[in-house]
């Protein structure tokens, strides 16, 4: 991508999480409250799955399951693709494209959740990357 930016430089550190036993109603309330499209499901401090709006529509609503009685573990996508904070943004973008996903939880060596990187995060810094590439081209 023409930049030395790493995932850890761009990721959101305040990730909204739920335990596997949380109800889908609670998951939906959190998504609405924080205006987000997903929550990470954790087991202890480790990312265990992810629930997106699409998961709720396809697995719960279309599946005619009761959201008050259905728990996060039943709706989450797992296993999840994750990335380390020292990975390049290019690696992250390629992984998202290859796996058809829009979000990558960021973990440390102990597999503990550190943050999340979304396609939107990458797109939002793209103009700054273009400026850096143009500036570097002028210097050379």
Image (cartoon, rainbow, N blue to C red):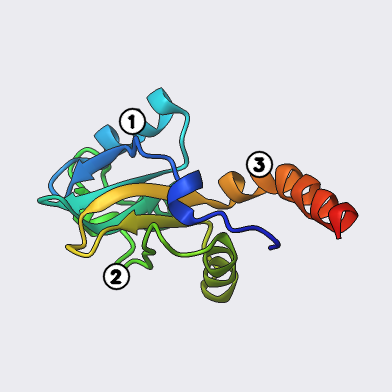
- Mark yes or no: residue 54 visible: no
Left-right relation of 103 to 48? right
Residue 94 place in picture, x, y as percent = 58, 71
- Mark yes or no: residue 81 visible: yes
| The furthest residue to the left | 44
- Residue at x 79%, y 45% (from the top left corner): 131
**On the image, which quarter does residue 136 sit in?**
bottom right
Q: Nearer the viewer, mark 3 or mark 2?
A: 3
Circle on res. 124: 3
**Helix, strand or loop under label 2:** loop
**On the image, which quarter does residue 81 sit in?**
bottom left
Left-right relation of 130 to 81? right
**Helix, strand or loop under label 1:** helix
| The furthest residue to the front | 140
Screen quadrant of the N terminus: bottom right
Screen quadrant of the C terminus: bottom right
Rate crowding at label 3 as few (under 14), some (14 to 19) or many (20 or more) other CA atoms within 10 Å: few
């Amino acid at each position: 991508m023409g930049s030395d930016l790493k995932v850890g430089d761009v990721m959101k550190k305040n990730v909204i999480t739920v335990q596997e036993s949380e109800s889908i109603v609670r998951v939906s309330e959190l998504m609405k409250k924080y205006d987000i499209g997903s929550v990470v499901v954790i087991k202890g401090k480790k990312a265990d799955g992810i629930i997106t709006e699409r998961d709720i529509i396809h697995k719960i609503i279309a599946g005619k399951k009761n959201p008050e009685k259905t728990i996060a573990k039943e709706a989450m996508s797992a296993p999840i693709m994750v990335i380390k904070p020292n990975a390049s943004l290019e690696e992250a973008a390629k992984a998202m494209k290859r796996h058809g996903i829009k979000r990558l939880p960021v973990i440390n060596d102990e597999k503990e959740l550190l943050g999340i990187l979304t396609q939107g995060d990458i797109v939002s810094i793209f103009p700054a990357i273009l400026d850096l590439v143009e500036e570097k081209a002028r210097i050379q």
